[in-house]
Amino acid sequence: ENGATFLQIREKDLDEGTFEQEAEALKKLCAQYHIPFVVNDSVEIALDIDADGVHVGQSDIKGRDIRSMIGNEKILGISAGTVEEAIAAEKAGADYIGVGAVFGTSTKKNARNLTVEKLKEISESVSIPVVAIGGIGVSNIMELVESGVDGVAVVSAIFAAAYLIGTIITYRVWSDIIVCICAFLYTLTIFQKDSGKMRSVLIVNMCLWVFY
């Protein structure tokens, strides 16, 4: 209701049956609001409940063709922490890449912290959307302005907030601002490289800014 554009369920401590029940309930809720819903790690549960897709880690794509398992119509997200992993994820058929932890996180014990510079390198190495995750909050979200990311994912920043609805709206607004600024900076980069492309790209990005 308040601006989330994508939802992923991630449960590491539930038994499979309870996890599937929870995922089924969330799938129905997301369908009411026309929000894509993906299941973390479990390809089997994602297929059983007919979720919109699945999000997996690097270890999950080694020796497994996840794209073939879920089909071309499902969303496939893959985590990456390096340029090499990002490229591998795109080759494995990913629709988007989750990159982090950008600022550290308490929700994932084995997360690797990344610099904004490294995040930018990863964003520039692939042609699919890149979503930043890990420790993102109101105090640091604007540090991602020049990272080239297409969105941000938050967990603790919302669920630990005193005013949940207002916090969700705030992050949606800041996320949109970041995407618009990244697009504008990309325009300036193209202008520096090839001034002949400036006119058409600037029109596209100014429309993006207005509609956001």
Image (cartoon, grey):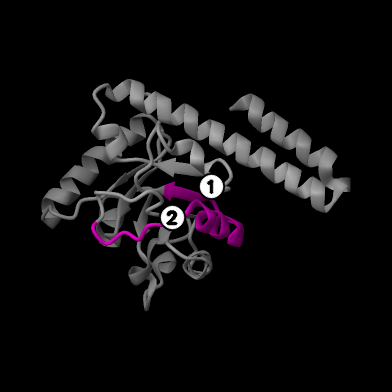
Quadrant (top left/top right/bottom left/bottom right) for the C terminus:
top right
Residue ID for mark 1: 149
Percent across and percent down for residue 1 are 36, 24
Name the quadrant containing residue 199. Answer: top right
Q: Is residue 116 left or right of residue 155?
A: right
Percent across and percent down for residue 160 are 23, 33
Q: Residue at (35%, 35%) from the top-left corner?
A: 31
Q: Residue at (65%, 25%) from the top-left corner?
A: 210
The residue positioned farthest toward the bottom in the image shown: 63
Badge 1 or badge 2: first in the primary sequence: 2
Of residue 155 and residue 3, the one placed in the foreground of this image is 155
Q: Is residue 173 left or right of residue 20?
A: right
Percent across and percent down for residue 133 are 39, 48
Q: Amino acid at mark 1?
A: Val
Name the quadrant containing residue 209. Answer: top right
Of residue 61 and residue 45, the one placed in the foreground of this image is 61
Examine the rendered structure and indicate whether residue 4 appears above or below residue 108: above
Asked whether disc 1 touches disc 2, contact meaning CB atoms under 8 Å apart, the reply is: yes
Percent across and percent down for residue 77 are 42, 56
Label number found at residue 99: 2
Q: Check residue 112 for magenta coloring.
A: yes
Inter-mark Cα distance, 1 to 2: 9 Å
- Graded by Cα atoms within 10 Å as few (under 14), some (14 to 19) or many (20 or more), the crowding at tag 1 reads many
Q: Which residues are magenta?
A: 109-132
Judging from the image, what secondary structure is the residue with disc 1 in?
Answer: loop
Q: Amino acid at mark 2?
A: Val
Examine the rendered structure and indicate whether residue 100 appears above or below residue 158: below
Q: Check residue 94 for magenta coloring.
A: no
Q: Residue at (43%, 61%) from the top-left corner?
A: 71
The residue positioned farthest toward the right in the image shown: 196
Judging from the image, what secondary structure is the residue with disc 2 in?
Answer: strand
